[in-house]
Amino acid sequence: MKITLISPNLSTSDRYGKALGKVGPTTEPLGLAYLASAIKQNRNDFVEIIDSAALDYGEKELFNHLKKTNPDIIGVTVLTPMYIRATETINVAKRACPNAKIIVGGAHVTIFPKQILEENEKIDYAVIGEGEITIIELLNAIEKNKVPSSIKGIGYRNKKSIKINQLREFITDLDIIPLPARKLLPMKKYKPAPTYYNKLPSYIMLTSRGCPYRCIYCSKIFGRTYRHHSVKRIIQEMDILINKYGAKEIIFRDDTFTIDKKFVRDLCNEIINKKWKIKWTCMTRVNLVDENLLKLMSKAGCWSMHYGVESGSQRLLDLIQKDIKLEQAFKAIKWTKKAGIDVKAFFMLGLPSETREDSLRTIETMKECGADWVQVTITVPYPGTKLYTLAMQEKTLRSFKWEDYQTWAGWSDKELVYVTKGRNADDLKRLQKRAMREFYYRPKFILKQLLNLRIDNFQMYLNGAWALFKN
Ligand code: B12
Ligand code: SF4
């Protein structure tokens, strides 16, 4: 069969507004690359990936492309804010290839499999959760014209009714999944956000899936059980990124990179043994690092760590079940800096019951915590999270238009999806900009960046500074 997997074109200006959109990231849709390699390993199909955002495909380009390939199966990945773009993509796909079967998957489908099938008759199958095993079983069934009633982890139409099958267990041994098929992606087109890299090419990679923590705003589509690849397999993937794609940097996009410290130590030691010049960054929690681990990570090439600090109010940290203390955050940032690693801290404004004073406290904490970079987003209750349930109960959700579910609304003309009681949307939007300006326009910050300035990062800083200035 011929299979085309598509990531819809939700552009950076759609996501971050016009000014910030210019420096927004275009990164690899790894989920589709994992699916493609699983299909290639198990079946003799032709598989291609269209990353519409990276290729900047409009409807015309997508239509012409699909008309030419004429696939039997079209798979579309869907995150919540790209739902409308995914619907447009499916409409174009059906116009170009009326007989193709449409399969959808991704976070939004995992949360709403039934609704999606109800809302869009053009969709034949919804894949729930991890897709690598499910897609093979589903393709086998489609090829044999069988009703997929016994395939775990799918939703489908049976005559006039919609069936949601039993859920599939998460994959325990991640190494059984083949390496993602990056050769099907336009690798030269990818560029992370400015604060995620120093040198290009910089590519994303995952070492694990799942997170045992319970933050109420998080869509944990890969469950609570943490699973990681073997060090051998990770080194093999890094080797490909470095030697085949010329990566100068790697961004480990795991939800929580240092859950298993022994594993991270083993990985760092192996990277050091390799004597690679590769630099890398990762994301983790402030309660999951210590001084020795950070020193080793620095020695292995880690140049930047990203921590979710979220709020300057301990009351709010407890309320969102972040399970960290503010002092822990300050300590972790201090240790990280001491180990020679830059820190980027994530903060949220507009948490449930957050007062204006709390917001201002968060902005002060941003400046006091010692981070080199910060990211300040406005709270969005994504469906499937505890926060979404809470907002539904409180009746504080203001929009069910999924395209509004963006955390950078302060930078665009988008409506805020959620405003906690007693707060005002315009004020929250203003505070999001003010937070960034107050942090990045400090003389201390500017001086440090001027001292760090090199030809290869000059443009990056210029773009970032211009985006802030214009707003
Ligand atoms: C890297 C990343 C990004 C990158 C983009 C990556 C990309 N190009 O896809 C950047 C930084 C740009 C990004 C941005 C955003 N992200 Co993000 N991101 C991630 C992250 C950390 C990893 C994604 C990944 O590669 N996963 C690994 C692969 C294997 O998983 P996957 O893509 O889900 O694919 C698997 C299955 O879902 C399924 N599947 C997926 N698609 C399909 C399609 C078919 C046909 C089939 C059969 C199966 C299938 O099979 C795949 C293999 O198992 C995830 C968290 C996570 N752990 O997944 C969050 C996550 C996906 N992001 C999230 C969010 C909220 C956002 C933003 C909206 C945030 C914002 N600023 O507003 C934006 C939206 C961007 C957009 N394009 O719409 C949420 C999604 C919630 C939701 N309801 O949609 C997640 C789950 C984080 C979280 N824990 O809450 N993100
Ligand atoms: S926000 Fe991070 S630490 Fe919290 S549950 Fe989600 S992945 Fe885990």
Image (cartoon, rainbow, N blue to C red):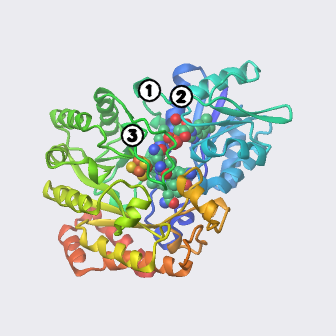
Give the percent coordinates (x, y) of residue 78: 61, 47
Residue type at the position of mark 3:
Leu
423 over 343 or under it: above or below: below
Quadrant of the image occupied by residue 66: top right
Question: Residue placed farthest to the right in the image?
Answer: 160
> Are the residues flagged by discs 2 and 1 in contact, CB closer than 8 Å?
yes
Give the percent coordinates (x, y) of residue 293: 18, 44
Give the percent coordinates (x, y) of residue 191: 41, 54
Residue labelled with disc 2: 169
Q: Residue at x 64, y 66 (%)?
A: 395
Secondary structure of the residue carrying tag 2 is loop
61 over 177 or under it: above or below: below
Mark-to-mark CA distance, 3 and 1: 15 Å
Residue labelled with disc 3: 206
Q: Residue at x 66, y 50 (%)?
A: 86
- One can see residue 151 in this view: yes
Residue 172, which numbered label? 1
Say which of marks 3 and 2 sits in front. Answer: 2
